[in-house]
Image: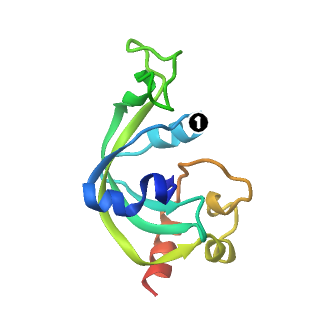
């Protein structure tokens, strides 16, 4: 799950301990989020920074929550076509698990994984939420521990 560190970084989550992962306005990313289950772990990825990469780990605490930002006309995520009776966008609540001692850079991920194994290494990928197969997640964790 990607976020720009100056907007919402791992340090924010560590301080707050939980957060709503709201503001997702891409249907494919939303659908990936909808496939999450309570107890799932997610990598926290800092994007739009130098270097981008995986910085921490989060746990899914709640799923299927209605994203409140879609109804807020003052939010940059406001969706005037969405209604309280039929919301388009939802979100999950995430909990802080840990920050890794070192960042696992996108460049290292590209050197280690193919685009079929790990979607984030695909050039031009703009999705903020991507699934990571369990076998690849285990390899990522081993890279972070070495």
Residue 75: x and y, percent? 45, 30
Residue, disc 1: 26
Q: Quadrant of residue 105?
A: bottom right
Q: Identify the colour scheme used.
A: rainbow
Q: Quadrant of residue 22?
A: top left
Q: Circle 1 — which element?
A: loop
Residue 28: x and y, percent? 59, 38
Q: Residue furthest bottom?
A: 146
Q: Quadrant of residue 49?
A: bottom right
Say how many tags the image has: 1
Q: Is residue 102 above or below residue 74?
A: below
Q: Residue at x 36, y 41 (%)?
A: 92
Q: Residue at x 63, y 63 (%)?
A: 117
Q: Residue at x 42, y 59 (%)?
A: 9
Residue 16 or residue 130, whichever sits in front: 16
Q: Residue furthest right?
A: 123
Q: Is residue 45 above or below residue 74?
A: below
Q: Residue furthest front?
A: 74
- Left/right placement of residue 65 relative to residue 73 reads left
Check disc 1: other Cα within 10 Å, few if <14, some if 14-19, many if 20+: few
- Left/right placement of residue 70 relative to residue 95 reads right
Residue 71 or residue 123, whichever sits in front: 71
Q: Residue at x 41, y 30 (%)?
A: 69
Residue 23: x and y, percent? 47, 37
Residue 71: x and y, percent? 41, 21
């Amino acid at each position: 799950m990607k976020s720009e560190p100056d907007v919402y970084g791992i340090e924010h989550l560590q301080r707050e301990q939980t957060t709503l992962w709201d503001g997702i306005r891409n249907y494919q990313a939303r659908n990936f989020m909808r496939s999450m289950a309570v107890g799932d772990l997610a990598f926290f990825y800092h994007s739009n920074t130098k270097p981008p990469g995986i910085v921490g780990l989060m746990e899914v605490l709640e799923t299927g929550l209605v994203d409140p930002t879609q109804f807020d006309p003052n939010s940059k995520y406001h969706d005037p076509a969405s209604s309280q009776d039929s919301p388009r966008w939802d979100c999950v609540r995430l909990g802080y698990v840990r920050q890794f001692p070192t960042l696992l850079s996108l460049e290292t991920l590209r050197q280690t994984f193919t685009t079929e194994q790990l979607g984030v290494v695909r050039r031009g990928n703009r999705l903020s939420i991507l699934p990571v197969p369990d076998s690849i997640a285990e390899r990522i964790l081993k890279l972070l521990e070495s």
